[in-house]
Amino acid sequence: MENITIAIDGFSSTGKSTIAKLIAKKYNYVYVDTGAMYRAVTLFAMQNNLVTIDFLKKEDLVKQLENISLEFIFNSDLGYAEMFLNGENVEKEIRTLAVSKLVSKVATISEVRKKLVLEQQRFGEKGGVVMDGRDIGTVVFPNAELKLFMTASADKRATRRYKELLDRGDKVSFDDILFNVQERDRIDSTREDSPLLKAEDAIEFDNSDMGIAEQFERMCSLVDQKIAQN
């Protein structure tokens, strides 16, 4: 049975990572969370005073890219790989609202995207990979056997994100979360380099009123079909 490449794109907080992890586990595929990679670069920029809400030191960050090492290390207790930045586990730090507010700004930098796309393509050279992000089906793996595009209303996505952060113990307001979701949509969809677009051959999933179990069942059916065809 030949392994395939599964590209999952879509708007922020649509549950791409959740569903991608489930699919990867079921088919014993490698899961790559590209959003975590952009978040890690953003965290690096924050730690080195290269980005805030008010400014972005683009040239300085580009010069520092060679000093950024990213890797996913599997955590057997969790059942998935966590993001490591320069040898340090930053999985929790990169999921904060502070990083969420700045990640789209950093992701507009062409040099950042070029570095991370090359790494993402290396991860998926041999197939058997599930990768989620914003430009997987359009830029990273335009020839992926299966492309999915996830969307949902901004209000539903903000509600999910709000509950997730509250459950983690973060002190956040719903209005801040909703604004962040809408602003990330705007930046991701209008940036010049690799904007968020639905690939022509991608299957769209609006999960505004769809639970994880239903999504998983429908997507696994599509994966089975593609594997059978290959």
Image (cartoon, rainbow, N blue to C red):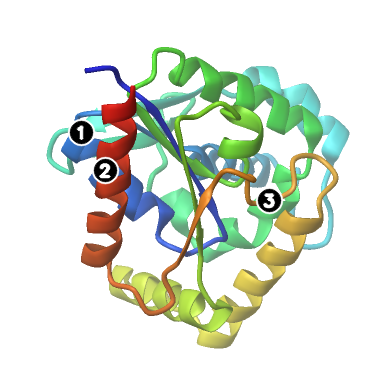
- In which quadrant of the rendered image does the N terminus lie? top left
Dot 1 falls on a residue whose secondary structure is helix
Task: Measure the C-alpha gap from mark 3 to mark 2.
Answer: 22 Å
Task: Measure the C-alpha gap from mark 1 to mark 3.
Answer: 27 Å
x and y percentages locating residue 48 in the rendered image: 68, 39
- Label 3 vs 2, first from the N-terminus: 2
Q: Which residue is mark 1?
A: 27
x and y percentages locating residue 199 in the rendered image: 63, 45
Q: Which residue is mark 2?
A: 23
Amino acid type of disc 1? Tyr
Q: Residue at x 72, y 45 (%)?
A: 106
User: Residue reaching furthest front?
Assistant: 229
Q: Which residue is mark 3?
A: 197
Horizontal side, residue 190 vs residue 41: left or right: right
- Nearest the viewer among 78 and 159 is 159
Q: Is residue 78 at all visible to an observer of this figure?
A: yes
Dot 2 falls on a residue whose secondary structure is helix
